[in-house]
Structure formats: C-alpha cells, structure tokens
Amino acid sequence: CVEQRYLVLYEDRLEVFTSALTARSGARPQVIWRSSILRLQLLDTVGFVLQREDGRILLCASGPADFRTWARALGPLFGLGHAGLRAGSVEGVSADKGRPSSSTPIRRKASATPQR
C-alpha cells in the first residue's frame, strides 16, 4: 500500500506528516533522525531507500523532476556528489553524524512516499 506523505527535510532529520495541512496545524510529525540512517540508496529516477537498523523506508518520488530535486537535497547530507546522483542506483554512507541541528527546512515536498 502506498500512502502519500508531506515531508520536511532538515540537516539533522526528516519530518513526516500525513499532509501539508497537518504540518501547518502544528501536529507532531514522525521524525526520522539523520543519525539513525545507515545508508541512503538511490533507485534510478524512482525514489530512495533509507536503510536503518530497524528496517528500510522507501521514499517514492512523484516523477523524474521530483526525484532530481530530492536527490539534490538529500545527496549532500549523505556524502553523495552530483556525479553519484547521476549514476543511477548509488549508495552513500551517512557521515558526520555530529553535524549541528538546524530549524530551517532544506526541502519541503508533498510527493515523496514513505513505506516500510
């Protein structure tokens, strides 16, 4: 089952809401901490897999343009340069887990789809 979610990306976490309206209402998000992600895998132009100790989370982009936008936002956080982002299915290792927290979103988008 695929369920669309509203995601807000920060340097230290990804916040997951059921909708943009829920995010604006001040509801508590599901938080995926960057430090809990062991690996980010790019799935061609389809989406991403966040590998954690407790399992994987699949994020599906709504299309190639959406995928490229997310890849540009996620790539630097996981040590993937532009060459890696164009290479198709590439894995990056989460690095620099002690990076300072930020309250300013890097990316907001309603089209990525988390699945477990």
Image: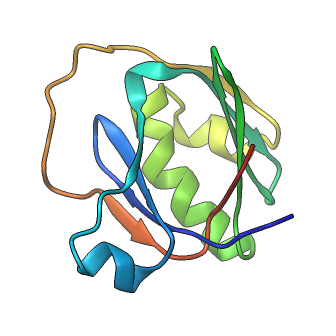
Residue name at image x 65 percent, y 73 percent:
4
Q: Is residue 24 left or right of residue 22?
A: left
Percent x, y of residue 10: 29, 48
Q: Is residue 28 above or below residue 49?
A: below
Percent x, y of residue 90: 75, 31
Percent x, y of residue 25: 24, 80
In the rendered image, the residue lying farthest to the front is 27
Depth order, front residue of 38/20: 20
The colouring scheme, among rainbow, by chain, secondary structure or one colour, is rainbow
Q: Quadrant of the N terminus?
A: bottom right
In the rendered image, the residue lying farthest to the right is 1
Quadrant of the rendered image containing residue 34: top left
Q: Is residue 105 above or below residue 78?
A: below
Q: Is residue 31 left or right of residue 4?
A: left
Q: Quadrant of the C terminus?
A: top right
Q: Is residue 19 above or below residue 73?
A: below
Residue name at image x 81 percent, y 43 percent:
88
In the rendered image, the residue lying farthest to the bottom is 21
Q: Is residue 57 above or below residue 99?
A: below
Q: Is residue 32 left or right of residue 49?
A: left
